[in-house]
Image: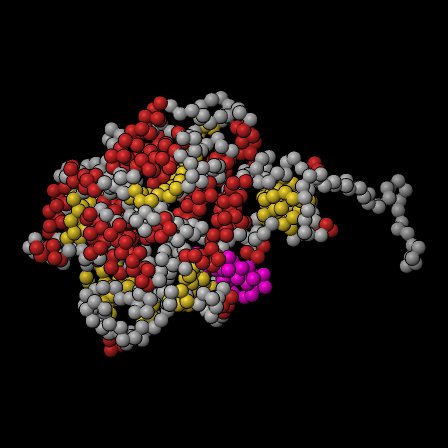
Amino acid sequence: MTSEHAEQLTLDGFADPKRRRHAQKAKIPAVENPIAQVVLDVQATHLGRTFDYLIEESQSEAAQPGVMVRVRFGGQRLDGIIWNRAAHSETPSSSLRYLERVLTPSALVSAAMRRDITLIADAYGGTRANILRLAVPARVARIDKEQQLAESGVWQGRTRFSEAQERARDTGFARFRQSYDGAERLRSALTGSGFASFVVDALPGALCWTRDVAWMMLETMLAGKSAVVVLPTAREVGDLEQTLSSCGLRRFAPDQAAHGGYRGDFVVLDAGALPPAERYRAYRAVSSGQVRCVIGVRSAMYAPVEGPALFMIVDDLAYQNMDGFMPYPNARGVLRLRAKTHGGVFVSIANVRSPISQWETNGDGDPSVVRETPVSGFSSPIRPLPAVVKEHSPWIRWLNRDELARLADPSIGARVPHTAVRILSAALSSGPVLLSIPADGITESLSCGHCHRQARCPRCTGPLERVAEWHASDRPTVGNTHSGMASTTRQSAGVRCRWCGAAVVNWTCPSCGNDRLRVVRVGAAGTSQELAGLFRGVPIVVSSRSQPRGVVETVAGTPQIVIATPGCEPRVASSDGVPGEYRAVAILDAWNSLYAPGVDARCDVLAAWMRSMALCAPRSRGGQGLLIGETDPVIARSLMLWNTTLLASKEVEERVETGLPPAYAAACVWGRRDAVMNTLSAIGVLSGDWSSVDDLPAVLGPVPIPQPATISERELASTADRVKAVVRVSQSHRAELAIRLRNAVAKHVATREAGELRFRLDPKDLI
């Protein structure tokens, strides 16, 4: 039984247990360009290149550049996009595999979109796979079948525009020309050819910006071009959608016909609000040319439009917050890059001009003065006429201590002084009143104990923070000031800069020479209870994300007090198609603006205040605005005159002196300390060719930062040493900085070095 000739016993009638092997059909490579260069859905930086695969002759017609395919990679099946087809490959033929399957019937990523994705990835130090993950929604197979019907002509979008829409365009341009000084120049760019960039200062007024944006979109669409508009939140998307509908444009939606197709003039791209199928349907409708107008939040910046187009961003200060995934692309930079690549028009419109917009408009109209980078460059300013601004804005007054003393107000120091109570009570007789308060929550900051100016680092002007316990002998006496908790104490060794991490000792205030620091803790909870005692019998509505009712979308135009945090201001219900207005708007606790730590803190504060003031009735209809409390005089003047160039110009001037963006290009690098330091050395900012910039150190920090919020990314407390550093170079070196950082991270990942390592360019905050 153990001999080599032993046989397995079988019963008569049973088949031979040997397996039958099916002969595999020989695969024949495509005759023309049999190599597919595929970008795989792999987010690792060191794998951010194309991989070669063979195309079978039977798949040659379907496997065109831009389609989605499925391939074998490292023992697993992955999806990818064919980036190009080639005749030869540098990979040995014995290592080449065939494509397993072609998933989409037509190109999902067009040639223009592939070019844009490559440029965006290079500009922000990422890979094409990083951008594809953000730009292309998850595939839904049944939508591809619907799209085949649309492309075959069964479902057709609008090919001609009605006379009503042409009248809306002409009416919008007439209004825009009467309000702005560069209307003709902007219209020529929208209807003409060639790249142009504009910065538009929006007029005050309830939803006035939506009418200007709608005109620019109509002007572009009627000229046969596409339009992409990125807005801060879904609330602004809804506001613009209503205005477009009033102009005769229809949202992309199911048609009333029996075949159930989709028709429309514009689509809404919102990764968070739309179901996957609807988002993919909207993406396919735009990529196929069925719809040429796109509005939405951040994800709309990747809308797959073709040819010259309008790329517009509303409130670009909000979109310095960039995307939440590597390589953290900035919406403003992406839109400007795409506009230049497409030969289209870039427009940034906002109530408050951001520092980058102000920097782009410097030079008194001479483009050569502004340094050109992949994501920024010279822009032409479009300013509203002073007489129109005065007519549209409310009468804004700053009720600080000096003004209240001049008015002999006996309630100086109160959160809502008697003068404000009298003005708001009079406004309540004819309609609603809005009171804007700081965001809910508790924050802490250090300021001068005498003049209350924010304490800043003498080395880099960054805000100071406490990092150690105060001496017991210096225990502060806590007092309630302006509904915030404030305390004064002498300095401790545990004070450092949030930006550069330098310890600060023997600090003195550059304004008054005082050497005491003041701890300020501010909060906005309980405001409604406080105001209920001042305005008895008046209905009070609270709109805040942290309140039980959440954000209130609209309120009636009846007398009532509306208390809202920034970004949660309810709209007043319209009547006869005209947007409703508040009779008065008051900004409470203005002194909180003195303690915000961010680089764009002053601009963000002014943007929040102007957003609220824009909902007020103009002075011609008795609208009044109140700014209550102490604040930076530049912010107050910019608000009262509705001229944000005052603050923006000062911001740029100070940032040139201190070496901060946008005067210089900056990147934040964070992770484990040894990985960060190795990266800084590798890119040459510690001792290499970029170790200094205009006699300023190229590196700020590193400073310790807390562990990440997600548990999966945390390290053991005994080994974690997480830090952040800020790298700054001249704007001419920005593109090379992105490539150097990408290569350093790719090497870190490829060699499997321990520890976290990440970076982002053009950060909003350096902390």
Picture coordinates of residue 604, whole percent (x, y):
30, 52
Picture quadrant of residue 485? bottom left
Picture quadrant of residue 448? bottom left
Q: Quadrant of the C terminus?
A: bottom left
Residue at 22% x, 73% y is 515
Picture quadrant of residue 477? bottom left
Above or below, comparing residue 624 to residue 471 in the picture = above
Residue at 86% x, 44% y is 16
Residue 411 shown left or right of residue 187 in the figure: left
Above or below, comparing residue 179 to residue 608 in the picture = above
Span colored in magenta: 739-761
Residue at 51% x, 33% y is 288
Residue at 14% x, 39% y is 622
> Quick one: 473 or 155, which is closer to the camera?
155
Q: Residue furthest top?
A: 258
> Quick one: 635 or 251, which is closer to the camera?
635
Above or below, comparing residue 733 to residue 272 in the picture = below
Picture coordinates of residue 303, whole percent (x, y):
46, 40
Residue 746 is inside the magenta segment:
yes
Residue 52 seen from this side: yes
Residue 558 is inside the magenta segment:
no
